[in-house]
Amino acid sequence: MPDKPAATPDGYCNNSKPISGTIRTVNAKNTGPKFFHLHGRRYGACPCGREVSLTDRGNLRRHKQPQE
């Protein structure tokens, strides 16, 4: 895949910006206290093919590219 972002030598993706239009919020409020860590969590898709949670500034968290 030629449009895949570059990776560091240890396998982490260098991209920090999500693909526009792919940001979604997980609303697990009705699932109860067991899934409290999911409340309001935002996810975005990376061009490398992984869906990653977002930081407070709207950037992707540090993640490894998927294995092929």
Image (tube, rainbow, N blue to C red):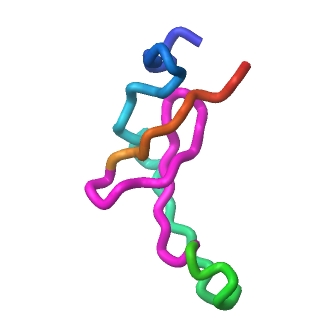
**Residue at the image position 64 percent from the left and 89 percent from the top:** 33
Query: Residue 25: horizontal and vertical position, in percent?
Result: 50, 66
Q: Does the magenta stretch include residue 42?
A: yes
Q: Does the magenta stretch include residue 53?
A: yes
Foreground residue, 21 or 1?
1
* Quadrant of the drawing holding the C terminus: top right
In the displayed orientation, state which residue is furthest to the front: 10
Tally the marks: 0
Query: Residue 51: horizontal and vertical position, in percent?
Result: 57, 45
Query: Residue 8: horizontal and vertical position, in percent?
Result: 44, 18
Residue interval drawn in magenta: 38-58
Q: Is residue 38 above or below residue 10?
A: below
Q: Is residue 47 above or below residue 5?
A: below
Q: Is residue 2 above or below residue 7?
A: above
Q: Is residue 66 above or below residue 68?
A: below
In the displayed orientation, state which residue is furthest to the top: 2
**Residue at the image position 52 percent from the left and 43 percent from the top:** 45
**Residue at the image position 41 percent from the left and 41 percent from the top:** 18
**Residue at the image position 59 percent from the left and 12 percent from the top:** 1
Q: In this view, does 46 lie to the left or right of 58?
A: right
Foreground residue, 26 or 11?
11
Q: Is residue 28 left or right of residue 41?
A: right
Query: Residue 5: horizontal and vertical position, in percent?
Result: 45, 20
Foreground residue, 35 or 45?
35
Q: Quadrant of residue 30?
A: bottom right
